[in-house]
Each structure stands twice: as structure tokens, then as C-alpha cells.
Amino acid sequence: MTSTRSLVTGATGYVGGRLVPELLAAGHDVRVLVRDERKARAHEWSVDAEIVEGDATDADDVSAAMADVDVAYFLLHSIDTGGDFAATERSIAEAFAAEAKRAGVRRIVYLGGMIPEGQELSEHLRSRKVVGDVLLESGVPTAVLQAGVVIGSGSASFEMLRYLTERLPVMVTPKWVHTRIQPIAIRDVLRYLVGSAALPADVNRRFDIGGPDVLTYFEMMQRYAAVAGLPKRRVFPVPILSPSLSSHWVGLITPVPASLARPLVESLRNEVVAAEHDITAYVSDPDDGLIGFDRAVELALTRIQNLEVPTSWSSAATAGAPAEGLPTDPDWAGGSLYKDERTREVNATPEHLWSVIEGIGGRNGWYSWRLAWWVRGALDRMVGGPGLRRGRRNQKDLVVGDALDFWRVEETDDHSFLRLRAEMKLPGLAWLELQVGSTDGGTTTFHHRALFHPKGLFGYVYWWSILPFHGIIFGSMQRNIAKAAEALEH
């Protein structure tokens, strides 16, 4: 019997990155369509999956990825691209559906949001519904799995809940804290996704999937606090907080930026409780039942504490987002590229120096003027950027695609080179490179380079205005990293 060949889009995202190993474990031949092959290679499953580099907005790329595929998983989103993300998502879904039909794919599986009947939907949920409609009308049998809030380490919804509860023992909240929600554990979501590959050919419909508990957001916060060993939280709902104000408030308190928080917050005004549980006629629930909310929180916190978070919302590439060029030396096709370069000798082994470099950011900070970094992060969040609150997925290890405060890992190579791309709001593109050189006479070379490509007049003004501070910020950063590495020698 031949195995099922499954195509997974969004494979470097939160759900997709966890689905691939589950499909492999179930005996599938897995192909992934990713925009950046390096990000896929950073996952352990990459050695067992076929990786196709391409763009989901390019019909030729999608067509090539669909060849000889039995089941195609649509796990793409454009929620954090700004502008009309709903139109972008619909366009991507239409192209995906057309290519799946043309390639003779026997099933599409889509993970969307639970759609309540008779309610005015948020833009986020309307987009989820439209994408589901497009796929269901494709002519390819489609399973649209409609989930409530997904509870798992690293999910955007869980991070919102976690940080709001942990950081605010007393809070004034919008009315949506009393909206009923049916959360579901990520493990149950993955089980339904894998099982949907084997649905009969005549099944072309939506399925609501939710866990065993129906709770208000207020109850979720209180139960999270109990599981985490925190005192009971005091919540005072007020009617005046609009979705816009709420999203900025969430963006200030949690790592989730306001641009992503707003559609999530707007969706919380809708009651999302499963109207049916028909999926069990095809994908049986475990003998001990679905994972309850408290257990899901416990599992998520255990993964976080053990540094075992395989994927995070912040690591996801966003469908429809523009791709940027890479800095090359000495010339760059993107135009002007300003550089600030520093080199020093460190009395430490390359291994010790690299261990400090790979641990930067997050709880460890940036080894320089802490207040300046905090202020820069706060200013970034005020204008809609990620700031410093995203932290790190893992405090000891970095892979391509990881978010690192307001940077993202763009390249890391053989324990000797790290390139970070800035994702803070800037009038241009910026990178930070840290490189461990060869050992000579008992010392190790530490090369540090900041690069900036300005956009418009303000970009040039920005570079020359901050250049005097580079000696303070980056100079002390290099010195302190060197000192930390040298301390490991003793």
C-alpha cells in the first residue's frame, strides 16, 4: 500500500511546524512549501520531509508543489501584514484551490476559526469564513476545521492570555472578558488535522473542533492563574474600551504586537462555542477524552519551563508579506548600505564566545546600556512595532527564523556567525552581524557589524542621527560580550 503524500503550507509557522512531524509519524510522505528553505532546514523534521522553496502567491510555485500530492494542508494567513489582509487571504486561497483542482489533489484540509451563527463577525473571522468557502467550492473535497482559541506553548492566543494574567493582578478590561469561548489544546488540533487526511471522498464540509470546557475569557484568566500558582486575579470590565484601544493595551502588556492583537481581540467579541462535534464520526477522540483547559495550560507551561517550545507565533512567516534582499559585501543591489564595523580580540575559546553570542536578547539582554534598549523597545511598541517583549523561543539555542526581541534570526552558521534582521519600525532596513573568527595565539577574533539601508530622506537623517550613539551601544555591547566569554574561561 502506497503512503499518502501530503503538502503542508505554512510549515514554518506555529501549527504547520508541529503538524509536519505528526504526519511523518503517521507514515505520510511530507512535502512543504516555504518561502525560505533555511527556515525549514532549522527544524528537526527537515531531514525527513521534501522541501520546496516558493511563494504561495505565485501560481507556478504552488503548481510545482502540488505535483503528485494526495492531501494539501492550507495553513496560510496574512493577518499581520496590515492593509486589506482579507483580500490577500482570499486571493491566495483561490490560487491554492485552482492549483489543487488542476493537480488532481484528492483532499484539502484547512484550519480556520469557529464561525458563530447569527452574529456579526469580526474581520478576522469573516476572512476565515471566506477562505473556507473558497476551498469548499474548489471542486476538491475539503475539510474545514473550525477551532476556538488554541491553547499551546507559543500560540499567539496563549501568549496573550499568559502575559495578561501574569503581569496584571488587577486589570480594567473590555466587555469581551465575559464572552463564552471553547478553547482547544494544540495536541487535539493536530490529531484532528492528521485524521482529516483519511476522510471519505464524499465529505466536503466544515467541522467545529473545541475542547471539553466552555469558559469566558475571565474564567480562563482565573483558571490560568490557579494552574500557574498565582493569586486570584481581579478584573473590572468597562464598556468604553474599543477594539483599537484594547489591541494597543494588549500590545503594551504582552509580546503580541498591536497589529496582530487587534484582529484577535476583535474576534473575542464573538461567542465561539461548537455547534456540533461531528468530526468524531471520522476521527475518534482518545479513550480518556479531549484535553481540558487546565491540563492544556499545564502542558504548555511545562514546555516553556523546559525550553521545549518547537514553534511560536512569532516565528511564522506571513503569507503575502514582501520579501527583502540580503546585505552582501562589498556591493548591494538594494542601493546605499551604511556600515558600522568593530573587531576585537577576546581571551576566550571560540566555543565560549559563541555561547554568549547565541544567548543574547530575551532574559539575558543585550550586554550594553540596558535603559537605552528598553527605551528603544518602548518607542517601537508605541508606533506598532514588536518592541522587546517577544523575547526568545529558547534561551540557549537560536535557529533561522526565530524572533529575538525586535530582531529575527536571518542566518546562523556553524557556531561562528549570526545575522539578525531588524523588525522594529524603521525608515529603512537594518541588520546586526556577530561573527567568531579564528583563534590566534590563544585569542579569538570577535567581529561586530551593523548595517542600514535607508529609505527616503528620513532614512538618511535617521542613520546620521544615531551614528554617534553606536560607540556607546555597540561598543559596550562588544566589550561586555567579550568579558562574559572570558569569564567562562575561569
Image (tube, rainbow, N blue to C red):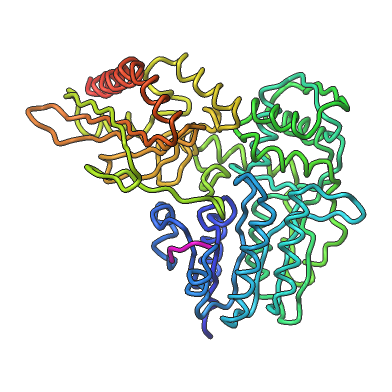
**Nearest to the observer: residue 392 or residue 2:** 392
Residue 438 location in percent, x, y? 14, 36
Residue at 74 percent across and 29 percent down: it is 226
Q: Residue at x 71, y 81 (%)?
A: 201
Which of the image's four quarters has the C terminus?
Answer: top left
Q: Nearer the viewer, residue 70 or 279?
A: 70
Q: Is residue 309 magenta?
A: no
Count the labels in the image.
0
**Residue at the limit of the structure toward the bottom, as seen here:** 1
Where residue 240 sits, quadrant-wise, is top right
Q: Is residue 273 left or right of residue 421?
A: right
Residue 121: give x, y in percent of width and height.
Answer: 83, 50
Above or below, 10 against 362 in this view is: below
Residue that protrudes farthest toward the right in the picture: 118
Bounds of the magenta span?
Answer: 52-56
**Outermost residue toward the front in this view:** 457
Q: Relative to 488, does residue 79 appear above or below in the rendering?
A: below
Q: Nearer the viewer, residue 55 or 153?
A: 55
* Residue visible at 54% across and 33% down in the picture: 390
Please tell me which residue lies in front, 392 or 408.
408
Q: Position of residue 26 (x, y in %)?
A: 56, 69
Quarter of the rendering containing residue 220: top right
Q: Main secondary structure of the magenta part?
A: loop
Q: Is residue 308 above or below residue 65?
A: above
